[in-house]
Amino acid sequence: MNAIEINNLTKIFQPKKQSKVIALDELSLSIESGIIYGLLGPNGAGKTTLIKILLGIAFPTVGDAKLLGENIGNYKIREKVGYLPENHKFPSFLTGEGVMKYFARLSGNMNKNINSEIDKLLSLVKMDKWKKTKVKKYSKGMMQRLGLAQSLINDPEIIFLDEPTDGVDPIGRKEIRDLLIELKNKGKTIFINSHLLSEVELVSDRIAILNKGKLIKEGTVEEITTSKQSYLFDVEPDLPEELLTGDLMQFKFNKNNNGLYSAVIIDIPQLNKAIDLLRKNNINIKEIRTQKSSLEDKFISLIKEVENKN
Amino acid sequence: MRNIYEMTKYTLKEAFSRKIFLVFFGVSSFILILFIIFFLFSNINSMTSMVKMNGKENIDLVAKIIEGIKAIIVAPLFGIGLFLSVFSASSFIPNLLEKGSVELFLSKPVSRRQIIWGKFWGGTIVVFVNVAFLIIGVWLLIGLKFGVWDLSFLTTIFTITFTFGVLYGLIILVGILTQSSLLAMMITYLIFFILSPVLASRDKLELLIHNKIVNWFIDGLYYLIPKTSEMATYTVNLAIGKYNGIELQPFLSSFLFMILTLYIGIIIFNKKDY
């Protein structure tokens, strides 16, 4: 069973006296259990709207979705879900411990040993020293850590995190990443919405890129960042000019700053043909690999591509 | 029920974190202390014993003293107590619906209906506790001092709390619609202090206005909005033991108003995106 099933989800906002805004446009996704799933997109892409719909905070205009096989309209399914909203505001009159206790009860955690569970989670996010302090005195990073602990208080099967490392220092971000991986290893499904592409790239198993409510790319980090038609060749000696402008011209061999040659090759027979040509010309091949771009580069090029099409 | 209970508990905590309810509690305690001092050191006993030769007059005098004490407690409690309670409770819903807060609540396994009922009961219980503290305190002091244990005085706890509940239903509806505590407060005060007292004397108004449609409109408005003015009068009358002339209609129509505002609020809340 998939942890999250999204079918043809559309959300249209129509503010008063303004033209309608399509926040989600016929979005369909299937997210399997036990993985970290990253949702990326520029501002206004519909990322937060999607999470809000899945959690019953907003309602879809068309389409439906399921969490753990249950329709999102059934609020009881949220007993198995944790959520860290972006820019969350905890009741300022509560202490960190009070926040945890209150949201534990509200999440359906009626465990009598709740205090020890709270202590464990607060120490996991390094907030145990501050548990008796009122949250109004917390910094942004502390609020974020408490928010993360709060999202885990009901031992959820799916955890939605909206900008989880926002306001957290680099060491804290690393700790959060390690925690997410630990949770994944325990079989939890984690759905991350973040602007920090490098963070998402480091932890996510699969990624979806949204733009203007539409899904423009979905797959593993490897699939998204690897260009199947672009290869890197490490050869010696350097390719002679007559070869580059002659037999190899069809492959657009081009030397980069690292001394490697990139080439555009559309399929395996073409790759074999390029290798044969290099060997025929006494060129030693030390390494061939598919060319990868960073998630950030890929993200920007994909968004630009879509913008240009429109 | 568990979810409503949890939301109620939360609202109680939220209410007691507000200084205004603590002030309410402090003022009530201060009033009770003043009465204790007054009863301990005043010469009420000598006043009443002076007229003991004529038993009837003595009873009348004691009754008048007790009546006076009850009236000076209940009348301001209804006006000022409810004013402060409305002031404090008006921000409960806008605070809940604030960005960053509403997402936390709505993402929990709690229905939106349960959230509103929890907010309603939490706010109402806190007012009940505050009012009960003062009324029961005064009732005990009067009973201990004069040996008069008039239970009807205690019913004012319920009429004052009920009046708050009716106004709170309106606060919740306006809060959901506008997310503005100021507007919720203003509309409630408008009904409490202006519309209800004016409409309570609509007979006099209708003598001045000779247009049937306008008079029907005034009548309709009278039956629609909560009758806080009549409820204030009846509360004071109940406190001093005057039961004649107390009608159920203002309570029933106000109760219907409360149910209506709460249900409209819940329906709108159930459909809103946050």
Image (cartoon, coloured by chain):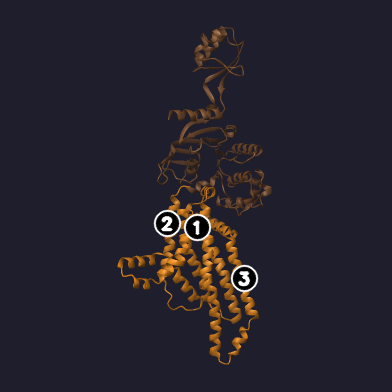
Chain colours: A brown, B orange
Q: Residue at x 63, y 38 (%)?
A: A173
Q: In the displayed image of the protein, which residue is found farthest to the right?
A: A129
Are dots 3 and 1 on a single chain? Answer: yes
In the figure, B270 relative to A223: above or below? below
Nearest to N terminus: mark 3 or mark 2 = 3
| Chain at numbered mark 2 | B
Q: CA distance from mark 3 to mark 1?
A: 29 Å
Mark 2, residue position? B264
Mark 3, residue position? B30
Left or right: residue B245 compared with residue A291 = left
Residue B252 appears anywhere in the view: yes
Q: Residue at x 60, y 68 (%)?
A: B27
Mark 1, residue position? B182
Task: Please provide percent x and percent y for residue A118.
Answer: 64, 49
Task: Please provide percent x and percent y for residue B190.
Answer: 45, 63
Residue B29 quadrant: bottom right
In the figure, A171 relative to A267: above or below? below
Dot 1: element: helix
Task: Please provide percent x and percent y for residue A227.
Answer: 52, 23
- Say what amino acid the circle numbered 1 marks: Leu
Q: Count of labels shown?
A: 3
Q: Are marks 3 and 2 in contact (CB under 8 Å)?
A: no
Instruction: Name the mark nearer the viewer: 1 or 2.
Output: 1
Residue A68 appears anywhere in the view: no
Dot 3: element: helix
In the figure, B88 relative to A54: above or below? below
- Say what amino acid the circle numbered 2 marks: Ile
Task: Please provide percent x and percent y for residue A77.
Answer: 50, 46
Q: Are marks 3 and 1 in contact (CB under 8 Å)?
A: no
